[in-house]
């Protein structure tokens, strides 16, 4: 999950080799920005006392940064459908594969350099056009300390599935889903638009990236797209 960098356009002739080097430099800066964001979040958590919810009944242990892919009304403080949410235990951005490297990924049998397996019937993209590994779905029940790396940190409770398989979610302290959304991180899930149809990253327009913070992910021909918001997880609940 990477931060968006501003690009300054200049009307001067730039040699092709220089342009390629600048592109590589920009990519390195993007990845460093991602790592810096995770580091700042970690530092902020370490500097805070252990968070307790509901009269001290739940304590939170600090963890390495994880990411939740969530669905819901941005203004809601609770809702249903959390059985469709997912968890990335590791930042999927640096582990992703560039769209222009998709042929190589396909030739490798769908095995990415980071050793995750690509599924051509169910795949994900992030805001810079990197093909990501799937999150773990559903998100396990429990309490998560989440933030959008802006102003709000809140406790997210994911309830066990009911008799219909539905899982409810809720945020404490009146926080909304938008409050704990990391706007710079964009993600979407792509599946075939028709049964047996083709939904390939080869059809994604690379010029549509990067996606602006808070923006919608681009459509891909032949695919049904589902946008997800991303929450940063900085702690896990531990019952007394």
Image: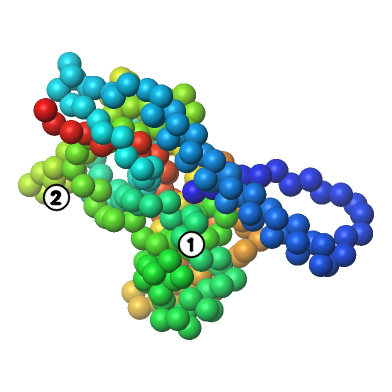
Q: Report, in whole angstroms, how far the alpha carbon at label 1 lies from the one at label 2.
A: 31 Å
Quick check: can you spot residue 157? no
| Vertical placement of residue 93 versus 117, above or below | above
Q: Residue at x 41, y 75 (%)?
A: 111
| Vertical placement of residue 175 versus 236, above or below | above
Q: Residue at x 40, y 62 (%)?
A: 133
* Left/right of residue 221 with respect to residue 205 in the rendered view: left
- Find residue 97 and report its horizontal and vertical position in percent: 51, 66
Q: Quarter holding the C terminus?
A: top left
* Left/right of residue 5 with respect to residue 98 in the rendered view: right
Quick check: can you spot residue 48? yes
| Vertical placement of residue 33 versus 239, above or below | below
Looking at the rendered structure, the secondary structure element under dot 2 is: loop
- Find residue 28 and report its horizontal and vertical position in percent: 63, 54
Residue that numbered label 1 is attached to: 96
- Find residue 120 and report its horizontal and vertical position in percent: 40, 73
Q: Residue at x 14, y 22 (%)?
A: 57
* Left/right of residue 6 with respect to residue 212 in the rendered view: right
Disc ID at residue 165: 2
* Left/right of residue 21 with respect to residue 212 in the rendered view: right
Instruction: Give the mark nearer the N terminus: 1 vs 2.
Output: 1
Judge by depth and name the residue closer to the eye, 111 or 183. 111
Residue lying at the far right in this picture: please name it: 12
Judge by depth and name the residue closer to the eye, 115 or 122. 115
Disc ID at residue 175: none
Label 2 neighbourhood size at 10 Å, few (<14), some (14-19), many (20+)?
few
Residue lying at the far top in this picture: please name it: 55
Q: Closer to us: mark 1 or mark 2?
A: 1
């Amino acid at each position: 999950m990477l931060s968006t960098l501003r690009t300054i356009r200049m009307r001067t002739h730039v040699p092709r080799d220089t342009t390629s080097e600048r592109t590589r430099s920009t990519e390195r800066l993007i990845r460093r920005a991602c790592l810096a964001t995770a580091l700042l979040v970690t530092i902020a958590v370490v500097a805070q006392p252990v968070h307790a919810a509901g009269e001290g009944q739940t304590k939170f242990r600090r963890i390495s940064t994880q990411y939740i892919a969530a669905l819901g009304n941005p203004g809601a403080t609770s809702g249903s459908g959390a059985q469709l949410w997912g968890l990335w235990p590791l930042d999927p951005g640096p582990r992703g594969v560039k769209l222009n490297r998709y042929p190589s990924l396909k030739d490798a049998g769908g095995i990415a350099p980071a050793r995750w397996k690509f599924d051509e019937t169910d795949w994900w993209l992030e805001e810079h056009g990197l093909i990501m590994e799937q999150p773990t779905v559903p998100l396990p029940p429990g309490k998560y300390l989440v933030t959008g790396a802006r102003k709000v940190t809140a406790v997210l409770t994911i309830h066990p599935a009911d008799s219909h398989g539905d899982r409810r979610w809720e945020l404490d302290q009146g926080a909304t889903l938008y409050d704990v959304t990391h706007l710079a991180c964009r993600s979407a899930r792509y599946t075939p638009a028709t049964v047996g149809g083709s939904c390939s990253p080869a059809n994604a327009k690379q010029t549509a990236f990067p996606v602006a913070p808070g923006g919608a992910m681009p459509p891909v021909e032949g695919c049904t797209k589902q946008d997800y918001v991303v929450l940063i997880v900085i702690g896990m609940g531990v019952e007394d």
